Every structure is written in structure tokens, then in C-alpha cells.
Image (tube, rainbow, N blue to C red):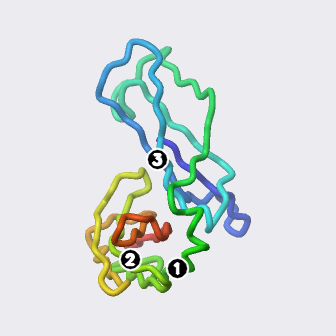
Amino acid sequence: TIGIYHWNSVTNQRDLIGGGIWKSGAAATSWTPASVTIFYDSASSKADTAFVIFSAASLYSNPKVNDSLMIDSSSYVMATGIDNLSAHSDNVNLYPNPASNQVSLAATGQFQAGLVEVYDITGKLVSAYSMHNNFLTINTQQYTTGIYFYKMYDNTGVELNVGKFSVVK
């Protein structure tokens, strides 16, 4: 599990702005490469800290002594389409944020939004929704309290926008 944080000088604490998780049910007897997709909205805050939690067994059972994790490199790969957002001139109004019962997304711009995917803080796809007339209301009553990320696509699958919202119960 990896959590990405940004120091908040107003509250004097770190705000969780993103994260990801990797797990495998397969046993490995030698070095095994893996990568973790981290979801966060880089436009809202710049990450300054990453916390990594590692267990060779399970975070909920008994980790084995002398198992290790080596991080020999890290890289940042921008998802397809994000670089082109400014060229699209699309804007997304998301409200209310934080949400308790529902959150609405209204897209404006030259492209027709077709699909919105919602991910939890670990990067797990929570749900996918079709947009109609560049508008979508998501019922968040079944969502747990936390930070969620969305990816908005046009009808051809081109990513138009990435953002986040919070659910508070």
C-alpha cells in the first residue's frame, strides 16, 4: 500500500491526496518486479511524502521475519490525455464537495463526455457511469467516508478530465 500526502501548514498535518495498492496471491521465491498505479489529482496539491506499507504475508496476518522490499527506482508516467486537457478547453464543475448523499459533475467544453469511472483511494474501480448531456449525478449513499477519484472520458474513450471528491458521512 502506498499513500501520497501533502503537508498542510494550516492544520499542521499531512493530507492524504492519493494512493495505490498492489497485491498478489502467488508465492514468489525470488525477486519479483511490480508497479503500483497511484491515483491522485496533481492539480490540487503537490505530493511531498509517500508512505509505503509492505508485508510479505498479509497486513492482517503474521508477516514473516527477514522478508524485504527494495525500491530501486520510481517513475512518474502521466496518463494518456492529461497532457491534452488544456487543449480540450473542458471544465468540470463538481458539487457538493465534500458530498454525503450525492455528487454532481457538469462538464463544459467542446467535447461530449460519455463515461465517468470512480476509484477509491487504493485505485480500485468502484463504479462506472454514463454521462448524459455532459451531466451526471452519482448517489454516494453506499460509498464509505473517504477520498474518491474520477476519470472522465469522451464517447471514443479519450480521457477528458481527472479529479477527486470526498465523501463524508
Eyeballing the image, is 115 above or below 76? below
- Percent of width and height locating residue 145: 39, 65
Q: Is residue 47 toward the left or the right of residue 112 in the image?
A: right
Eyeballing the image, is 155 above or below 108? above
Circle 2 residues within 10 Å: few <14, some 14–19, many ≥20: many
- Viewer-nearest of labels 1 and 3? 1
Residues under numbered marks 2 and 1 in contact, where contact means CB atoms less than 8 Å apart: yes
Q: Quadrant of the C terminus?
A: bottom left
The residue identified by callout 2 is 113
Q: Residue at x 57, y 79 (%)?
A: 89
- Percent of width and height locating residue 157: 37, 64
Q: Nearer the viewer, residue 42 or 141?
A: 42
Q: Residue at x 44, y 55 (%)?
A: 121
Q: Residue at x 33, y 56 (%)?
A: 125
Q: Nearer the viewer, residue 125 or 131?
A: 131
Assign a secondary structure to mark 3. strand
Assign a secondary structure to mark 1. loop
Name which residue type carries label 3.
Answer: Gly
Eyeballing the image, is 168 above or below 41? below
Circle 3 residues within 10 Å: few <14, some 14–19, many ≥20: many
- Percent of width and height locating residue 51: 58, 42
- Asked where in the image residue 142 lies, by quadrant, the reply is bottom left
Q: Is residue 158 toward the left or the right of residue 42 in the image?
A: left
Circle 1 residues within 10 Å: few <14, some 14–19, many ≥20: some
Q: Of the residues under marks 2 and 1, which one precedes in the sequence?
A: 1
Q: Of the residues under marks 1 and 3, which one precedes in the sequence?
A: 3
- Asked where in the image residue 131 lies, by quadrant, the reply is bottom left
The residue identified by callout 1 is 90
Instruction: Tell me the distance, in whole angstroms, between the alpha carbons under discs 1 and 3.
Output: 27 Å
The residue identified by callout 3 is 20
- Percent of width and height locating residue 152: 41, 69
